[in-house]
Amino acid sequence: MTDRDARQPRTAAPASRLGLALFGLYVLLYGGFIALVLARPDLVAERPFGGVNLAIACGLGLIVAAVLLSVVYMVARAGR
Amino acid sequence: MLHETSPLAIGIFAAFVGAVLWLSFRLGRKGQSAQGYYAAHGQVHWAVNGIAFAGDYLSAASFLGICGMIAFHGYDGFLYSIGFLAGWVVALFVIAEPIKELGKFTFADALDARFDSWGIKLAVAISTLVVSVFYLIPQMVGAGSLVTPLLGLPHWVGVILVGVAVTCIVVTAGMVSTTWVQFIKGSLLVLFCGVLTGLILARGLAVNAGRGEPVDLTPQVRTIRPDGTVLVDGKPQGTDHDLRPVGTITRLPERYGDARATGPLGPLAYLAALEDSTVVTWEKTTRTDADGTHDTFTPRERPAAELLRPGGYFKGLAGNTLAGRLDFASLMLALFCGTASLPHILIRYYTVKDAAAARKSTVVGIAAIGGFYVLTLYLGLGAMTSGALDPTDTNMAAPLLAKSFSETLFAIISAIAFTTVLGTVSGLIMAGSGAVAHDLVENVCGVRMTDHEKVRVGKLAAVALGIVAMALGILFKGFNVGFLVGWAFNIAASANLPALVMLLFWRRTTKQGIIAAVIVGMLASLGWILLSADTFEKVYGLPGSQSPMPFSQPGLVTIPLGFVVLVVVSLLTPPPSPVRR
């Protein structure tokens, strides 16, 4: 490691690449939801999930996804 | 609406607040050094810190604001829940561990770690103060809204009560007592909101909130005369002549036949049944003449399905206008980027011992906060159909929902909401006092202080911030607190996130680039907000059409602007010199 490398924060270390990958995945989910609301607001009123509309299902899904991804991250990092 | 006070409610409320203050004074002796006052010695257990994250983050905006917005406008309030939680993904995966490694007491420590720059410390300290003050406003407004129905006191008394209590908490023991207040408040908030949601599902849905008589659909007019007296439908307001509580169902789904109530429902069945029901919302119109200000509340029957999709608050989404859609996209971007840029959240990373503890505490925080935001959907919809809403105050939806079950639950929920405000405000004042004492006085002005003096200056700054918070809380009475906190997220995301992210991921970042990004991001977002249509209408009382800004939420423009400014200025200035830590 050079002096220059030593001066940099350690965020680009391999251990955090998993975090960045999970972050990218969540950005896709969150961005996809916003794009859906913007592009097809009529579609989110559809009710494919037992009477619950797509808008609510997506919202709850995004919250659950954030919790699940964070747990995956914690378990994976603990195992390193 | 006028609200009758109850001795039981006041007793429970006093017990909660008294217990919190007692704990704070008891912990006071543990925070006398600078390390103890600003960072709780870095020895808070990660699980406690995780729940304290929830206590710090779940502010009046999350509890009172979101519930009120869902109750009044439907699904759009839930968009805040989604965005507020999504921001934690940025905090966990991108920010948590590096910020713990870089900083000591404040956010400025982290941004300045590679440069030791006077300019960075000054710019970030100012940005911390601006964001903290903007975040303080909704908390104080929420506190004022709470005491009116609970204690029968005016709005401003509630604001003063919170201001004094919080200043006591922060001044007595700094981060140690703040952490425990936030831990207790976070635990209680999630627990009792879970209880309230269970009661909502057990009650199910009922026509006219279970009252036998038909729903009254006549409009109501409230007149506030120039001398301050209030009339309702032309007669003086009193406990026997007041605005009707609103928010009811007029028709259940056909599958329930002639039944006037569904009985207990599961979480998904509740949403499905509501979607097929008909509800009554109300539209408020205001006109002013020589006799005073006249607010007319006109009930409107409509399918609940209309309220369970986007567009109830963000009218542009339903109307499919470009400005409305940009406004929505801009808010969602600011909520996503804002959490990891909030100084009072970032300083909590300095209260744990290492990066692993920072990571684990964030995961605990996300689980608690995520669980709470799922509950907000049911609390808001439960309030919408409870027949208990005050049409003049969106912030009281959750406590009045609790009141529709029992006076005791109302007192408990109100007391928790009040401690919610205490927890968040104490975190904000801690962040602000650190910015003043550690960043401005010591690092920028170069005043050398002993450990004891550093703590004393921090406490003086906390008192001053408490006074500013009280004044602003009184000034902004009547605003939805969720809406107000959106402003703070926009400013935090625009001023702080570009600098933080580029510092971590782009080696060519220079101190001039960071300073420019923080200042431009802060001023651009602040200026945009002050010139937006929302501010014209709600603050200046001018027509929104006179606003020069194309949409109200600035983040879509000002967050990318911060990144662009940082890159351009960094490329135009010499590469960073060796670190001097």
Image: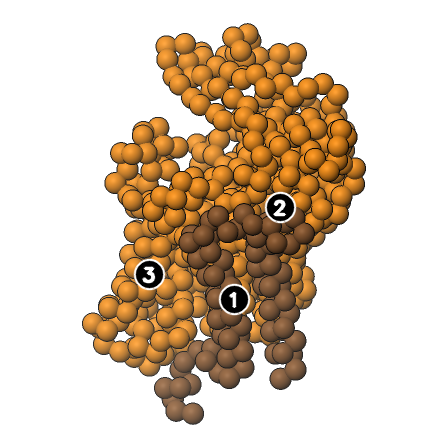
Chain colours: A brown, B orange
Q: Nearer the viewer, mark 3 or mark 2?
A: 2
Which residue, given by chain and number where applicable, does mark 1 sit on?
Answer: A26
* Quadrant in the picture for residue B492: bottom left
Which residue, given by chain and number where applicable, does mark 3 sit on?
Answer: B560
- In the image, residue A6 sits, relative to residue B201, either above or below, namely below
Q: Earlier in the sequence, mark 3 or mark 2?
A: 2
The location of residue B429, given as percent across then percent down, is 50, 49
At label 1, the amino acid type is Tyr
Q: How far apart, in angstroms, are the residues tagged by discs 3 and 2?
A: 31 Å
Instruction: Give the residue drawn at x 30%, y 51%.
Output: B523
> Which structural element holds mark 3?
helix
Which residue, given by chain and number where applicable, does mark 2 sit on?
Answer: B377
User: Foreground: B334 or B300?
Assistant: B300
The location of residue B28, given as percent across then percent down, is 64, 52
User: Foreground: B425 or B247?
Assistant: B247
The reply to whether residue B454 is in sight is: no
> Which structural element holds mark 2?
helix
At label 3, the amino acid type is Pro
At label 2, the amino acid type is Leu
**In the displayed structure image, the side of residue B145 where residue B540 appears, left or right:** left
Q: Are marks 1 and 3 on the same chain?
A: no
The location of residue B92, given as percent across then percent down, is 54, 67
User: Foreground: B484 or A45?
Assistant: A45
Instruction: Give the residue drawn at x 60%, y 68%.
Output: A70
Instruction: Give the residue drawn at x 42%, y 17%.
Output: B293
